[in-house]
Amino acid sequence: MAATGKITVRAEAKYVGISARKARVVLDHIRGRSVPEARTILAFTPRVAARDIEKVLASAVANAEANHGLDGANLVLEAAYADEGPTLKRWRARARGRVNRIRKRSCHITLIVREADTAKRPRKQATDAPAAAQSTSGREPTTETQPKSRRRLPAKKKEAVA
């Protein structure tokens, strides 16, 4: 399944009673993140889909721990997607003998987790970027650089011309 050769574990929730479009909004927030970070995001996401996705994530982590002996805190979400499920078609009576169709959409939520890479690249610090830019420009680095003030100066008064 994975191109990296790492163990991947999959969990699915089928026939979830929410539209795939609504579930994808939440899945976009957690795709590619670590499991602890994804759990935190889902806990503070106010959308209804977050509860169902949180259950699928817990299932994927439990599958990884029980079946493959992986550490749940050392997993990364490799893929997260929601496919459309069957649509229940209902109707609602309207004025003058008409009918409006109601579509009760469902979806299938799939999460695939894998082991995190052990050798992570360190994140670049904000102080490293200006130093690297100055060293490549050929100028001498200054001891202290201060950002320009964004405060507007008062307008200059014009002298009256007679």
Image: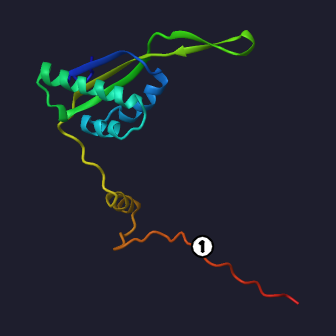
Provide the secondary structure element on which disc 1 rests: loop
Q: Residue at x 11, y 24 (%)?
A: 69
Q: Residue 26, image x and y in percent?
A: 41, 32
- Which amino acid type is shown beneath numbered disc 1? Arg
Residue 50, horizontal then vertical, whole percent = 37, 31
| Residue matched to label 1 | 152
| Quadrant of the snapshot with the N terminus | top left
Q: Quadrant of the C terminus?
A: bottom right
The front one of 26 and 136 is: 26
Mark 1 neighbour class, 10 Å CA radius: few under 14, some 14 to 19, many 20 or more: few
> Relative to 143, is 21 on the left or the right?
right
**Residue at image coords 40%, 71%:** 145
Task: Please tell me whether residue 83 is drawn above or below residue 142 in the rendered image.
Answer: above
Q: Residue furthest left?
A: 69
Residue displayed at 18% across by 31% down: 72
Place residue 129 in its image quadrant.
Answer: bottom left
